[in-house]
Image (spheres, helix red, strand yellow):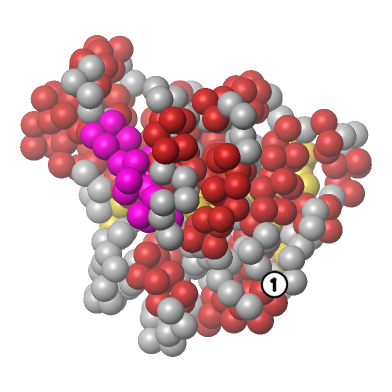
Amino acid sequence: MKITGVVAEYNPFHAGHEYQLKMARKLSGCDCLAVVMSGNYVQRGEPAIIDKFKRAEAAVYSGADIVIELPMPFSCQNAEMFALAAVKELKKLNIDSISFGCENDNSKLLEKIAGLQLSPKFNNYVKEEMKKGLSYPNAMSNALKFVLGNEADAVYSPNNVLSVEYIKSAMKLNLNLEYYPVRRLGMNHNDVEISGPFHSASVIRKHIIGGSYSNLKLTEKSIQMIDKFYAEHKKYNSLNNYLDFLYYKIINTPELNKIYEIREGLDNKILSQVYKHNNIDDFIMSLKSKRYTYSRLRRSLLNILLDIKADDITDIMSDRNDYVKVLSFSNTGRKAIKYAKSNGIKVINRYSDYKKYDLISENLKGFNITNRSSNIYYLPLKNRKINSEYTENAVYVDI
């Protein structure tokens, strides 16, 4: 079975994602498109606007064959950690290739940059730049400019950074994969105004929260899922919903410096800004500096909210689990599940499957963090769900 992997967040699923899946299938000629998707929290450091099962179902209706979950806490960490965890999950499905959206679809150049970033000499350049007080992304950019000159422009966008990280991850895992980049059309990743054939996820989220999204480039099923979520919970989710909860967590966490990515005095800086701001963005901007980027600060605050410690990251990274959590699948996805099982992978469609495989879920740190995080996800919403990891099953889509 020829399987192409896609890493995604679908926050929410929109027409640009549908186009990417269509092109991934066309370019790769695969039998199955397998997506690993962030769960209830996403890489930019915030809760997804609607829950993971609804986003996964919308994806399967529009081209994906199976959607598995990118485990917590990796779905809301830096690009390198996010990408490595995602490719590890896709590896369990025996993928032959990866397809990704990007601004530069020169796969050979992206592979060249990925290989360069893995070299010790290049990483010494990055360390020297960081000694100047630069953040890691800026230090990386300067090092790339120094070594590659104009070719470095290939990674100066969020999607290209992730594309390189996917390739690096495959190299680290010694995977012999084909790469199928799909050039993005229309708006850039973080554009906030409507233009072009496709709309960015950022502008779509802005309009959904504002209550006006009928003219946006969303798929029919995605609109149904967005409407269904609102009908159930009376609002959409965002990090701003958690400001008071976050303040509470900050002042009641005795050792903030044990939270992942809270170091170098950032804990004291955070404490000094408690109660001084009425929204998350203002809070983050008060902490921003040359060393601490906006994105890193969002993720750091989310780690506080979810109580993700540095030790948790270490433990989970060293845990060689051999199971995948399915969120949604089609008939073709069912074949991919059988194929994974034939290769010794434990496939979790529902909570009872843990017991079937003699897995004690409460002893799995990843499961516990995911369940706790899902409980917090529903905290600011109406009709809250408790322990949903025990009760919600993978969604089968008959198409």
Give the class, few, some or many, for how many residues have Cα within 10 Å of label 1's Cα (few <14, many ≥20): few
Q: Residue at x 82, y 31 (%)?
A: 363
The residue to which callout 1 is attached is: 382
On whether residue 145 falls in the magenta region, the answer is no
Q: Residue at x 30, y 12 (%)?
A: 120
Asked if 394 appears above or below 150 in the picture, the reply is below
Nearer to the camera, 2 or 54: 54
Residue found at the very far left of the displayed protein: 150
Task: Report whether residue 255 is seen.
Answer: yes
Task: Report whether residue 44 is seen.
Answer: no
Range of magenta residues: 280-296
Nearer to the camera, 234 or 363: 234
Asked if 334 appears above or below 225 in the picture, the reply is above
Locate residue 178 relative to residue 93 in the image: left or right: left
- Residue 241, percent across and down? 54, 62
- Residue 286, percent across and down? 32, 46
- Residue 270, percent across and down? 44, 38
Q: Quadrant of residue 320?
A: top right
Q: Give the secondary structure at mark 1.
A: loop
Q: Residue at x 43, y 82 (%)?
A: 213
Locate residue 140 relative to residue 42 in the image: left or right: left
- Residue 314, percent across and down? 60, 22
Residue found at the very far bottom of the displayed protein: 214
Nearer to the camera, 1 or 310: 310
Give the amino acid type for the residue marked by disc 1 in the picture: Lys
Asked if 198 appears above or below 389 in the picture, the reply is below
Q: Quadrant of residue 234?
A: bottom right
Q: Which quadrant of the figure contains the C terminus? A: bottom right
Q: Main secondary structure of the magenta part?
A: helix
On whether residue 284 falls in the magenta region, the answer is yes
- All told, the count of numbered labels is 1
Q: Residue at x 47, y 45 (%)?
A: 274
